[in-house]
Image (spheres, helix red, strand yellow):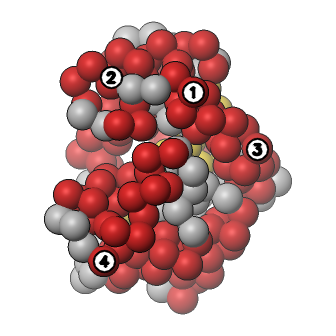
C-alpha cells in the first residue's frame, strides 16, 4: 500500500488535485469533508450530530471523525493505497492514522502540503461559494474562522510528519496543471527514495 496525505488550508485546491493524483497513482481518494456532507445530505444520525460543526467551520469531534475514517479505510479489500484529503486535521487524528496503518502493516508514506496564503484562500472560497451550495463557503467570517482553525490546530500536523522526513510543501498558486506537475515531482522523488 502507498498512502499519501494531501494537506493544506481549506480552499487550497486539495479536492481539485486529488482527482488527478488518485488516477495517476491508482489510489482511493477519501475526503472526510465529502463523507460528512454525504451524511448531512442523507440526514443520518451522524449527519444530525455534525451539522453545527460544518455550518460554523469548527472541527467535528475526533471520536466521530476517526471512527468514520477507519470504517471507510477498512471497507476496501486489498487496496493499492489511499489519498487522504482533509484528514488528519490535528495531532490526535495523525496518531490514530499511523496506528491504523500500522495495524494494516502499512504506513503514511508522504504528506504533500499545498501552500496558499490567507487572502487568496478567502477569495477562492468566496468564489467557490457562488456555485458549491456549501453554507460554510458563503460567509467571510466563517471562512476566516476555518483558516484560523487550520493555522492553530491543523498546521502542526505538517511539522509532525516533517520531523519524520515525510512532509513536503508545494506552491499552491498557479494553474491546475502547473500545481499537479509540482505535486507529481514531489511524490516521484519520494517514491524513488523508498
Ligand atoms: P472540508 O471539505 O475538508 O473543508 O471540510 C468541511 C468541514 O468538515 C470542516 O470545516 C469540518 O467541520 C469538517 N471536517 C472535515 N474533515 C474533518 C476532520 N478531519 N476533522 C474534523 N472535522 C472535519
Can residue 118 be seen here? yes
Q: Residues within 10 Å of mark 2 (few under 14, many from 20)?
A: some
Instruction: State the quadrant of the N terminus.
Output: bottom left
Q: Residue at x 67, y 59 (%)?
A: 90
Q: Residue at x 39, y 52 (%)?
A: 33
Earlier residue among tags 1 and 4: 4
Which residue is label 3 attached to?
152
Give the side of residue 122 with respect to residue 79, left or right: right
Which residue is label 1 attached to?
141
Q: Secondary structure at mark 4?
A: helix
Instruction: State the quadrant of the C terminus.
Output: bottom right
Which residue is label 4 attached to?
45
Residue 78: x and y in percent read 28, 80
Measure how far apart labels 3 and 4 are at the Cα level: 29 Å
Question: Mark 3 and 2 residues: CB-CB less than 8 Å, in contact?
Answer: no
Q: Secondary structure at mark 3?
A: helix
Earlier residue among tags 1 and 3: 1
Q: Residue at x 82, y 54 (%)?
A: 163
Earlier residue among tags 1 and 2: 2
Q: Is residue 144 above or below residue 83?
A: above
Q: Residues within 10 Å of mark 1 (few under 14, many from 20)?
A: some
Q: Secondary structure at mark 1?
A: helix
Residue 113: x and y in percent read 59, 37
Q: Nearer the viewer, mark 1 or mark 3?
A: 1
Which residue is label 2 attached to?
128
Measure how far apart labels 1 and 4 are at the Cα level: 28 Å
| Label ID, residue 81 | none
Earlier residue among tags 3 and 2: 2
**Residue labelled 1 has its Cβ within 8 Å of some atom of ligand 1:** no
Amino acid at each position: 500500500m502507498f498512502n499519501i496525505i494531501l494537506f493544506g488550508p481549506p480552499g487550497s485546491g486539495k479536492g481539485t488535485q486529488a482527482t488527478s493524483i488518485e488516477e495517476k497513482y491508482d489510489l482511493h481518494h477519501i475526503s472526510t469533508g465529502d463523507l460528512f456532507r454525504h451524511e448531512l445530505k442523507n440526514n443520518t444520525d451522524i449527519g444530525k450530530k455534525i451539522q453545527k460543526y460544518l455550518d460554523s467551520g469548527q472541527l467535528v469531534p475526533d471520536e466521530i471523525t476517526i471512527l468514520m475514517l477507519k470504517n471507510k479505510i477498512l471497507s476496501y479489500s486489498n487496496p493499492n493505497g489511499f489519498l487522504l484529503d482533509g484528514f488528519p486535521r490535528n495531532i490526535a487524528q495523525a496518531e490514530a492514522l499511523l496506528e491504523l496503518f500500522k495495524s494494516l502493516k502499512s504506513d503514511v508514506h508522504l504528506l504533500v502540503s499545498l501552500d496558499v496564503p490567507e487572502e487568496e484562500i478567502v477569495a477562492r472560497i468566496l468564489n467557490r461559494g457562488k456555485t458549491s451550495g456549501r453554507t460554510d463557503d458563503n460567509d467571510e467570517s466563517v471562512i476566516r474562522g476555518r483558516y484560523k482553525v487550520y493555522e492553530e490546530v491543523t498546521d502542526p500536523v505538517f511539522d509532525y510528519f516533517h520531523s519524520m522526513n515525510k512532509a513536503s510543501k508545494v506552491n499552491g498558486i498557479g494553474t491546475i496543471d502547473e500545481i499537479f506537475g509540482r505535486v507529481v515531482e514531489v511524490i516521484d522523488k519520494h517514491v524513488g527514495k523508498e
